[in-house]
């Protein structure tokens, strides 16, 4: 597609419920990132994929958070047993460069999924 | 660890006046620097980047930014502000020495351009 697509745009979950957030990156983009943006703050890194390999998951806040990209394209961020502090906008981004040393280093972001845990 | 500071929560400017949104950074290696803009209920939109070369980089919508290595700054500028420039602006850095390609973002600066 023309840009990064995320679904759903909005999700309301009851505390303790599991949720799954989907990201469709730009076709051909090797790198895929998930970020969490709390209200009034800048995005914070969660995890990074290069193709299907999850190379960095240092930003995942707890073992309730899990991400996958099994075929190197679509990615899913799953949050188990959601808590109120998980309420945030979850942003997905993709970029072309596979090694991080090319000119095409900018990441293109989706519109995000706003998760509200009640 | 890499970090980004945007010292101003909000910048107010009159339409037609020049604007500056400040950003300073800290990295261990050479920085890749970025500016993104976020409109309400929209994702982050890429404005411009500094990788190497000329310290003054030009980007979308008439914005430019100046890389200053000695001051570790990358301030965003525009000669003449428009009301439609009102949005949330984020500075971000990637450390070329750090494994992985993640961006570290500043806290954001809200730009308000008044007619």
Image: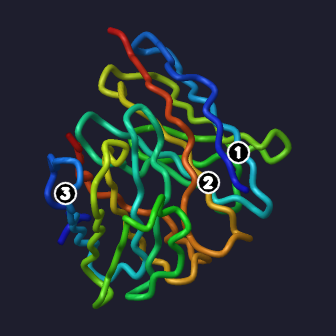
Q: Is A49 on the left or on the right of A3, as rendered?
A: right
Write down the chain letter for disc 3. Answer: A
Residue B12 appearing in the image: yes
Where is residue A115? Give x, y as percent. 24, 48
The residue singled out by tag 1 in the image is B25
Q: Is A22 on the left or on the right of B26, as rendered?
A: left
Residue pictured at 45% horizontal, 46% vertical:
B36
Front residue of A48 and A82:
A82
- Residue reaching furthest right? B70
Q: Is A46 on the left or on the right of B4, as rendered?
A: left
Indicate which label's residue lies in the foreground, 2 or 3: 3
Q: In the image, is residue A45 above or below residue B3?
A: below
Q: Could you give the CA–CA distance between mark 1 and mark 3, rounded to whole angstroms?
A: 38 Å
Marked residue nearer the N-terminal end (2 or 1): 1
The residue singled out by tag 3 in the image is A17
Q: In the image, is residue A79 above or below residue A37?
A: below
Q: Are marks 1 and 3 in contact (CB under 8 Å)?
A: no
What numbered label is drawn on residue B93? 2
Q: Secondary structure at mark 1?
A: strand
Q: Are marks 2 and 1 in contact (CB under 8 Å)?
A: yes
Estimate how packed mark 3 is, as few (under 14), some (14 to 19) or many (20 or more) residues with alpha carbons within 10 Å. some
Where is residue A52? Give x, y as percent. 38, 88
Write down the chain letter for disc 2. Answer: B
Residue pictured at 43% horizontal, 77% vertical:
A31
Front residue of A86 and A90:
A86
Q: In the image, is residue A75 above or below residue A110?
A: below
What numbered label is drawn on residue B111? none
Q: Quadrant of the C terminus of chain A?
A: top left
Where is residue B1? Give x, y as percent. 73, 56
């Amino acid at each position: 597609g023309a840009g990064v697509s995320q679904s759903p745009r909005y999700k309301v979950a009851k505390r303790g419920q599991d949720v799954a957030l989907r990201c469709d990156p730009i076709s051909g983009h090797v790198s895929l990132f998930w970020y969490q943006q709390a209200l009034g703050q800048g995005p914070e890194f969660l995890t990074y994929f290069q193709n299907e390999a999850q190379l960095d998951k240092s930003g995942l806040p707890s073992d309730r958070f899990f991400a996958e990209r099994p075929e190197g394209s679509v990615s899913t961020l799953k949050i188990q047993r959601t808590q109120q502090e998980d309420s945030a906008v979850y942003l997905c981004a993709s970029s072309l460069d596979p090694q991080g040393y090319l000119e095409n280093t900018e990441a293109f972001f989706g519109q995000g999924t706003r998760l509200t845990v009640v | 660890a890499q970090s980004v500071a945007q010292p101003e929560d909000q910048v107010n400017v009159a339409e037609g006046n020049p604007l500056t949104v400040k950003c300073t950074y800290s990295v261990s290696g050479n920085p890749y620097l970025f500016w993104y803009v976020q409109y309400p209920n929209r994702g982050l939109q890429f404005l411009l980047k500094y990788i190497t070369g000329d310290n003054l980089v030009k980007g979308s919508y008439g914005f430019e930014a100046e890389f200053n290595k000695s001051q570790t700054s990358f301030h965003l500028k525009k000669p003449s502000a428009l009301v439609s420039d009102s949005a949330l602006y984020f500075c971000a850095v990637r450390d070329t020495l750090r494994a992985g390609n993640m961006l570290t973002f500043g806290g954001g600066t809200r730009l308000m351009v008044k007619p």
